[in-house]
């Protein structure tokens, strides 16, 4: 069996743990320096994953914006852009989303019902991978590993971050803390309620702290005995 990719959860949150507010427009938590840092992490990744809810809510492109970083990828024998990945149970994905029309290869992981709902809507835009009745994250990682994906960057949303952590599938967290207080219990958080391995007694290892203007970036290893892949 191929080795599963290293899973890095990338998130920006407010001081009180929210990743957005409830307004019609996306809350920008990062500053320009932190957006550039995220671009660098994307450039170092083999694939970038977001959940279907995030695609529908934010309509992101998920690109490496720096032409220089893309050139470095190509010079090292990698595709210009990382593979873009999403997961859906329902199959409710609009083919007009920016996600499909920018960058390189796209993968959609779903189950039998989601695949039936999708039908041929994404034909020519993405490869649809059916993982049994429901798409399990462990099976998704096995499939990505078999495709030669060594580093997976997960950019949200709450359901994806919660799932990877609750199932013990995340290796690293890079958490950018913005000097903002949201204070709205209806707004989405970094993670939702779950039975996380080790519970509240488990401590992750803080490996690095960086200040980027008014944003603090905290790097944690989820499994302290592990080390990131090269």
Image (cartoon, rainbow, N blue to C red):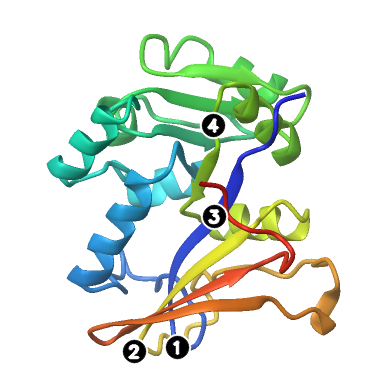
How packed mark 3 is, by other alpha carbons closer than 10 Å (few <14, some 14-19, many 20 or more), is many
Q: In front here: 108 or 7?
A: 7
Q: For mark 2, what is the residue?
A: 179
Numbered label attached to residue 211: none
The Cα atoms of the two marked residues, 1 and 2, are separated by 6 Å
Numbered label attached to residue 15: 1
How packed mark 4 is, by other alpha carbons closer than 10 Å (few <14, some 14-19, many 20 or more), is many
* Residue for point 33% across, 24% down: 77
Disc 3 + disc 4, Cβ < 8 Å: no
Q: Quadrant of the N terminus?
A: top right
Disc 1 + disc 2, Cβ < 8 Å: yes
Query: Of marks 3 and 4, which one's residue comes earlier in the chain?
Result: 3
Q: For mark 4, what is the residue?
A: 149
Q: For mark 3, what is the residue?
A: 8
Query: Of marks 2 and 4, which one's residue comes earlier in the chain?
Result: 4
Q: In front here: 154 or 149?
A: 149
């Amino acid at each position: 069996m191929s080795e599963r990719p290293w899973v890095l959860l990338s998130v920006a949150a407010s001081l009180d743990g929210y990743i957005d507010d409830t307004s019609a427009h996306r809350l920008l938590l990062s500053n320009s320096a932190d957006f550039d840092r995220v671009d660098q992490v994307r450039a170092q990744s083999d694939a970038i994953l977001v959940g279907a809810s995030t695609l529908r809510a934010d309509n992101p492109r998920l690109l490496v914006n720096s032409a220089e970083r893309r050139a470095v990828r190509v010079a090292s024998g990698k595709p210009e852009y990382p593979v873009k990945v999403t997961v859906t149970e329902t199959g409710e994905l609009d083919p007009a989303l920016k996600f499909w029309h920018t960058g390189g290869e796209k993968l959609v992981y779903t189950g039998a019902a989601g695949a039936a709902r999708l039908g041929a809507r994404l034909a020519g835009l993405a490869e649809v991978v059916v993982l049994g009745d429901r798409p399990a994250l462990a099976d998704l990682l096995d499939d990505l590993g078999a495709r030669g994906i060594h580093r997976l960057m997960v950019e949200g949303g709450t359901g994806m971050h919660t799932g990877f952590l609750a199932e013990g599938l995340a290796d690293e967290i890079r958490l950018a803390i913005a000097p903002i207080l949201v204070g709205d219990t209806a707004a989405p958080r970094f993670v939702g309620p779950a039975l996380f391995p080790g519970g509240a007694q488990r401590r992750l290892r803080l490996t690095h702290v960086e200040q980027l203007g008014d944003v603090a970036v905290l790097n944690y290893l989820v499994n302290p005995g592990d080390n990131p892949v090269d």
